[in-house]
């Protein structure tokens, strides 16, 4: 469940980011539209949206000014009709011209008395306007535009209801139209401005809090866009630029209060252009380093290059020469076709013969130059191919000598340098082989010569141990002498075997054996040493036989050295792991332990006389891992060592074999 929520959080964070920014954009656009429209008096002023008393709004004041002017004009005209809606009793009016009542929708309205439910009174006596609200005069604070003066003696009284009741009428003269308009504007601002703005701010803040998940979503989108061909991305720039132009025209139309006839696109152009641009920026941010990796043209060029690289250098050079010649063909054709044209218009344009001859000569010279270059390049390509072949042979150890090239060849100096390099390599190789041979012979001879005196020393030490009248101190010295002599004998034998393996004289008896059984027998023979070490050895060996081809005695010595090395130098109280795994046609045994000391970096521990800790004085010869590697490779296996801080891992790998011994033997 936790993994599922982690996979959903990036999508949620990115969705919140997109919706939040989009809502903020729409809200800002709506605010700009209302502000521009209000400045042009196209709609009800948006500052009247949050009215508590509609009689104090600018819209109500503007409406009364308009109604007052209309009533005065209609009353001054003897044939003027009632411009109001008599059935709408939210606004009572009485209009008189002289002593006669021209228009009225009530007979209860008096200058000093308002009907029940009405708290606002406006009177006009032909000269001035007086306004009363809740029984108090507010003429100074409620300014109403005076109507144009007329010759008729017109007076008007208007009374507005304190709490207007609903009245449906489509005409502009209805007082309820004003109230409905105010309610619609309020709903518009709340649900299309305030709520989206708050939601946009909340979603954007959410995406900021979950920024790390949003980054993961960006990376996932970049992974997808990174697999889109570059040519397709460039092709999509055309509709993107068109969408940007449409968004600019939409913004310009809003600012200038003009109409834009593009349907729903005028509302979607700005966010579409924004998020389109965001995809491009996100793609460049994460895929800039390999932006051409997914390119059709780059892929075709790479395919062509790979096809060329499969051919020798000479053939590649020849093909490039052919393409070079083909690239000049359009110019040759132009020259060839221009000659008849010049001949046909010789006299019409006054072209001189010298110009024609120059053009023809230039074409012939270019063709001859191309032919000569192709010939020279072909010769150079052949020489380069031969030189590269000799360099490849030298790299493989076959010193065949540099190819004989003439002095005018482009690669003569390179061939000379190759000859000098091969001569130096021969000298260095001979010196190294001579040195290695002498070193191996010296080690072999010394090891062989040391065997006899060491055997005598060990024998006399054993005889001294059997003497009864030796002092106690001398007896201790004899024991120490015997131990050191035996250790020296083991070291000499190890050096002798390593020397034989180096010279290829190590005898191995390779035959099928059960790898798992050999490891179990090694652990059984070393059971006492494992118990005395205080370490916990954890073998994980398969129950089924694992058949390989190797020398059982040599391989036994390999794991005896590896396990003994782990028992000697592991951290006290730690665990040693011995695993045998089979993957495909390969069997691998791994010994892992935690070293008592931190292991050095960059040191090949399988070299002779190399120790993991140079300060050790435990008598180790530094040949254990070297012998393990030498014996493993002599049996046809692979040996490797890996170290990381104080973690040591040795791996021995052998290919599986289908052969089986004639009868199961004890290793």
Image (cartoon, grey):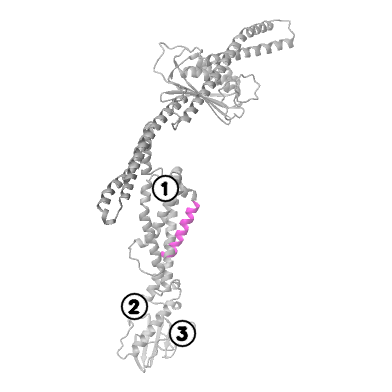
Above or below — where is 408 with respect to 63? above
Q: Which residue is mark 2?
A: 172
User: From where the camera sits, is residue 242 visible?
Assistant: yes
Q: Residue at x 32, y 46 (%)?
A: 331
Label pair 2/1, CB-CB below 8 angstroms: no
Q: Return the residue nearer the eye: 199 or 420.
A: 420
Q: Is 459 situated left or right of 140 in this image?
A: right
Determine the secondary structure under disc 3.
strand
Task: Please provide percent x and percent y for residue 83.
Answer: 33, 84
Q: CA distance from mark 1 to mark 3?
A: 66 Å
Q: Which residue is mark 1?
A: 221
Picture quadrant of residue 451: top right
- Residue 420 magenta-highlighted: no
Crowd tier of the residue under label 3, counting other residues whose Cα lies within 10 Å: few below 14, some 14–19, many 20 or above: some
Residue at mark 3: 132
- Where residue 251 sits in the image (x, y, percent)? 40, 64
- Span colored in magenta: 191-210
Disc 2 and disc 1: Cα gap in Å? Answer: 54 Å
Crowding at dot 1, Cα within 10 Å, few <14 / some 14-19 / many 20+, comes out as some
Mark 2 crowdedness (10 Å alpha carbons): few <14, some 14-19, many ≥20: few
For marks 2 and 1, the one nearer the N-term is 2
Q: Magenta span has 193?
A: yes
Judged from this view, the residue extending furthest toward the left is: 344
Label 1 sits on a secondary structure element that is: helix
The answer to the question of whether label 1 and label 3 lie on touching residues, with beta carbons closer than 8 A, is no
Residue 354 in the image, given as x and y percentages of width and height: 32, 49
- Measured as percent of width and height from the top left, residue 33 is found at 41, 68
Q: Residue at x 34, y 43 (%)?
A: 328
Q: Is residue 28 above or below residue 392?
A: below
State whether the magenta stretch is mostly helix, strand or loop: helix
């Amino acid at each position: 469940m936790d993994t599922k929520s982690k996979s959903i959080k990036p999508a949620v964070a990115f969705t919140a980011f997109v919706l939040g920014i989009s809502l903020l954009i729409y809200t800002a656009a709506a605010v700009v539209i209302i502000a521009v429209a209000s400045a042009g008096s196209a709609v009800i002023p948006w500052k009247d949206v949050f009215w508590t008393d509609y009689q104090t709004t600018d819209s109500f004041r503007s409406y009364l000014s308009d109604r007052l002017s209309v009533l005065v004009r209609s009353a001054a005209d003897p044939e003027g009709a009632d411009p109001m809606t008599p059935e709408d009793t939210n606004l009572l009016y009485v209009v008189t011209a002289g002593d006669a009542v021209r228009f009225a929708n009530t007979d209860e309205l008096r200058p000093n008395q308002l009907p029940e439910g009405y708290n606002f009174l406006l009177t006009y006596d032909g000269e001035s306007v007086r306004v009363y609200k809740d029984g108090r005069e507010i003429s100074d604070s409620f300014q109403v535009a005076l109507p144009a003066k007329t010759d008729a003696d017109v007076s008007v009284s208007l009374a507005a209801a304190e709490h207007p009741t609903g009245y449906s009428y489509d005409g502009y003269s209805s007082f309820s139209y004003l109230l409905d308009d105010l309610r619609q504007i309020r709903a518009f601002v709340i649900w299309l401005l305030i709520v989206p703005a708050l939601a946009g701010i909340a979603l954007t803040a959410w995406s900021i809090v979950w920024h790390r998940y949003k980054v993961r979503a960006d990376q996932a989108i970049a992974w997808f866009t990174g697999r889109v061909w570059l040519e397709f991305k460039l092709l999509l720039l055309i509709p993107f630029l068109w969408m940007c132009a449409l968004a600019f025209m939409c913004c310009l139309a809003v600012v200038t209060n003009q109409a834009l006839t593009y349907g729903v696109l005028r509302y979607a152009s700005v966010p579409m252009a924004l998020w389109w641009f965001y995809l491009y920026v996100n793609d460049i941010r994460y895929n800039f380093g390999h932006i051409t990796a997914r390119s059709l043209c780059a892929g075709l060029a790479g395919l062509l290059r790979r096809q060329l690289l499969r051919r020798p250098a000479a053939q590649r050079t020849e093909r490039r020469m052919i393409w070079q010649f083909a690239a000049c063909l359009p110019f040759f054709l132009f020259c060839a076709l221009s000659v008849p044209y010049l001949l046909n218009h010789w006299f019409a344009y006054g072209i001189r013969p010298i110009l024609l001859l120059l053009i023809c000569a230039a074409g012939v010279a270019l063709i001859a130059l191309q032919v000569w270059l192709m010939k020279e390049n072909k010769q150079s390509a052949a020489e380069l191919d031969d030189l590269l072949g000799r360099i490849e042979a030298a790299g493989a150890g076959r010193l065949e000598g540099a190819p004989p090239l003439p002095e005018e060849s482009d690669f003569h100096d390179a061939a000379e340098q190759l000859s000098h390099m091969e001569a130096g390599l021969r000298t260095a190789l001979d010196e190294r082989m001579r040195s290695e041979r002498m070193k191996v012979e010296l080690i072999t001879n010394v090891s062989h010569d040391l065997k006899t005196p060491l055997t005598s020393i060990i024998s006399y030490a054993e005889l001294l141990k059997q003497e009864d009248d030796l002092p106690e101190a001398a007896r201790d010295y004899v024991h120490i002498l015997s131990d050191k002599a035996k250790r020296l004998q083991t070291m000499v034998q190890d050096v002798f075997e390593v020397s034989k393996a180096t010279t290829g004289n190590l005898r191995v008896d390779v035959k099928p054996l059960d790898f798992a059984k050999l490891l179990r027998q090694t652990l059984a023979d070393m059971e006492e040493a494992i118990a005395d070490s205080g370490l916990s050895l954890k073998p994980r060996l398969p129950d089924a036989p694992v058949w390989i081809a190797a020398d059982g005695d040599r391989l036994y010595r390999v794991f005896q050295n590896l396990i003994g090395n782990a028992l000697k130098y592991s951290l006290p109280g730690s665990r040693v792991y011995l695993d045998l795994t089979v993957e495909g046609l390969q069997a691998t045994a791994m010994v892992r332990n935690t070293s008592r000391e931190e292991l050095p970096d960059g040191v090949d521990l399988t070299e002779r006389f190399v120790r993991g800790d140079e300060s050790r004085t435990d008598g180790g010869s530094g040949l254990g891992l070297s012998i393990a590697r030498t014996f493993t490779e002599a049996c046809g296996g692979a040996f490797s060592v890996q170290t990381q801080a104080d973690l040591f891992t040795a791996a021995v790998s052998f290919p599986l074999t289908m052969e089986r011994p004639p009868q199961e033997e004890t290793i």
